[in-house]
Amino acid sequence: MRGGSEHLSWTEVQGEGHIDVCFAIRDSRVRSFRSAQPIDFAISTLGQDPGIKLLSDLPWTLPSEVPVGSSVALMCERTSTGQMMPEWRVSP
């Protein structure tokens, strides 16, 4: 596989997947993260293409409450600057 932006392309996806890995940052060396600790993250695979993995925070769920393999839906939250940020939410 070659690197470089000329080898990238956009693919529309359904936004559903499964948790592959969960982890929390509890003692970050990054100053801007310190006030938000612990920060919970998940690496999820897309249901329609498990080869595509996305990293996102889990703002409403603790990693200890999310078993690997849990179903998730991709949601986009607008930041204070208007940027859309992807976040996984555990599906009921």
Image (tube, grey):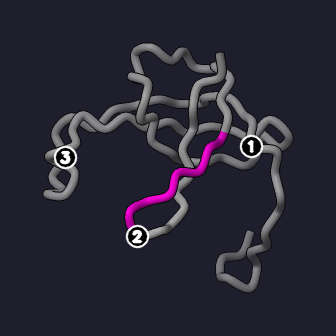
Among the two numbered marks 2 and 1 on one chain, the one whose residue lies closer to the N terminus: 1
Labels 2, 1: front one: 2
Does the magenta-highlighted stretch encompass residue 28? Answer: no
Callout 2–callout 1 Cβ contact below 8 Å: no
Q: Residues within 10 Å of mark 3 (few under 14, many from 20)?
A: some
Q: Is residue 86 above or below residue 90?
A: below
Labels 1, 3: front one: 1
- Count numbered badges in the picture: 3
Label placed on residue 28 = 3
Q: Quadrant of residue 11?
A: bottom right
Element at label 3:
loop
Element at label 1:
loop
Q: Position of residue 69 (x, y in %)?
A: 65, 20
Residue visible at 54% across and 44% down? 87
Q: Which residue lies under the disc numbered 1?
A: 15
Residue visible at 74% across and 85% down? 6
Label placed on residue 81 = 2
Tell me if 31 is positioned left or right of 46 in this view.
left
Q: Position of residue 65 (x, y in %)?
A: 44, 14
Callout 1–callout 3 Cβ contact below 8 Å: no
Q: Residues within 10 Å of mark 1 (few under 14, many from 20)?
A: some
